[in-house]
Each structure stands twice: as C-alpha cells, then as structure tokens.
Image (cartoon, helix red, strand yellow):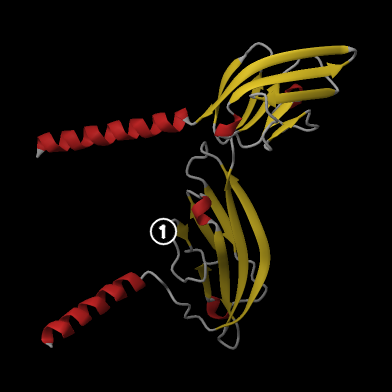
Amino acid sequence: MKKISIINLSIKKILLIFLLPVTVISLNIKNTINLGIITKEYSDNDIALLYQLKCQNQITPVNNSIIWMYNNSETLPQNINDNSKTVILISNMTEKDTGLYDCCVQDVDNRYICYRQTLRVLRKLPTLAIDMRMNNNIVILKNSNAYLWLFNETYSNINCTLNNQRLPSNIFLSITTVPQDVSIEYRDMFINKTREENTGNYSCLGVGNNKRINITFYLKINSSFLKAKNSFLLVVIIFAITFFHFIL
C-alpha cells in the first residue's frame, strides 16, 4: 500500500510540474473591450526588432493598477517588458508574438476592464526584381516575391507556360502595379511567394504592336541559402564540441 501511495504521489507531482506553466486568470474581470487587429511585418534583415504596444485604456486606473495579459495569461513571455505598465515593449518580434494582448485596468469597484488588442505578426518576404532579357537560367530563393522583366518592349498580351503546362496559381502576367522600390518594367511576370513547383522551363509569347516575340528561360526555386546557413551552424557546433572535448 505504501508503494502505491508513493507512486500516486509521484504522479501527482509530475502532473503539477506540467501544469505550472499554465496560468489561470486570477483577475476579477468585468468586461473585455476588443479594439481590433494590428498587423506588423518583420524581415530577416531587421536587427533586434523592438515593438511598442500602448495600453488604450479609456478610464483612469485606480491606484495606477494596470496588468497586462498575453493570450489570457498573466505570465508574459520573456521577450515582453511591462515595467512601464502603460506600454509594453516586445523585443526580437517574430510570428511567435502573434496573439491577444489585454491591458487590464482596475476600476473604482476594484474589478478590471480589459482593453484587448490582437497583434498579427507576419514575416516580410524578400522582394526580387529580375531582368530576364539577358538571362535564361536563374536561381530564385524560395518564399520570395519575384518581379520579372521579360521583353524589351511593352506588349498588350503576354502568355506563358511552365513545362508545357498552365502556370501555377501564384504566377501572374502583365500586372498593373509594382512596389515603390521596383521599376515598372518588371511587371511582365510576378511570382507571389515562390515555391518549388515554380521550378522549370518557361515559354512566353508577347503579342502587340504588330509583333510576336517568343522567349524561353529556366527558373530554379530553392532554399540553398537556408541550407548553407544550417550547414555553417552545424560546423560551428561540431567544432565547439570537439574543442571542449580536448579541454576536458
């Protein structure tokens, strides 16, 4: 019987350990006001991106009592600083910081009114402008937005095939607008969020001004940069392990 009791006690302790990170809301909340969705973008070039989220309280907090919650939890992630109370700072912001941010303010009845802001964090895709007039074989990074300049002249009608088949749904021809940092000449073809199925042989026909011009080219979509990056990290880890092994 003692052994069974010890086992049951151990199981309870293990369950408690797993349940500890889950924080139950202890605030006496009387109302939650949704203030809408905020969308923020970040790119791999951003260094230690710091984002400031302000409490949009509509009442004056009693005793300056303001408590922030993230996804209904009073325990904030380590990269969120709420020392200011009226403002939280989110450091190194990524998609993981997407969620519900509640700024809860104590009212005169000692209950809390929470002002909720939904933060949506998106990774900004790299934008590429590629001149295909002098190239017929190009490697493009996966998960990027690619704008291609195909013809020397502007044609009213452009038709393309990929491997003698219809183009995938993420490829558009003769688009009307391009980003501000991309010249308008790169509107012949737009590949939205490049993926591996965009790899292959392209054949494009431009028709207009009593002319018909056909061009062919090959595009390769891969993530070689990421693979190289991971390989470099692996080499560093192996070197570190070997180094410490000789020291010890």
- Viewer-nearest residue: 6 or 239: 6
Side (left or right) of 109 relative to 164: left
- Viewer-nearest residue: 92 or 212: 212
Locate residue 121, reporting x and y percent. 57, 51
Q: In the rendered view, tell whether residue 121 sits above or below residue 165.
A: below
Residue at x 45%, y 65% (from the top left corner) = 76
Residue at x 90%, y 12% (from the top left corner) = 210
Residue at x 83%, y 13% (from the top left corner) = 212
Locate residue 99, reporting x and y percent. 55, 61
Asked whether residue 183 is in view, the answer is: no
Give the residue pinned by disc 1: 78
Locate residue 187, reporting x and y percent. 75, 26
Q: Quick one: SS at disc 1? A: loop
- Viewer-nearest residue: 169 or 155: 169
- Viewer-nearest residue: 179 or 203: 203
Q: Quadrant of residue 12?
A: bottom left
Side (left or right) of 243 relative to 150: left
Q: In the rendered view, tell whether residue 177 sits above or below residue 188.
A: below
Side (left or right) of 177 relative to 72: right
Residue at x 61%, y 62% (from the top left corner) = 118
Label 1 environment density (alpha carbons within 10 Å; few <14, some 14–19, many ≥20): few
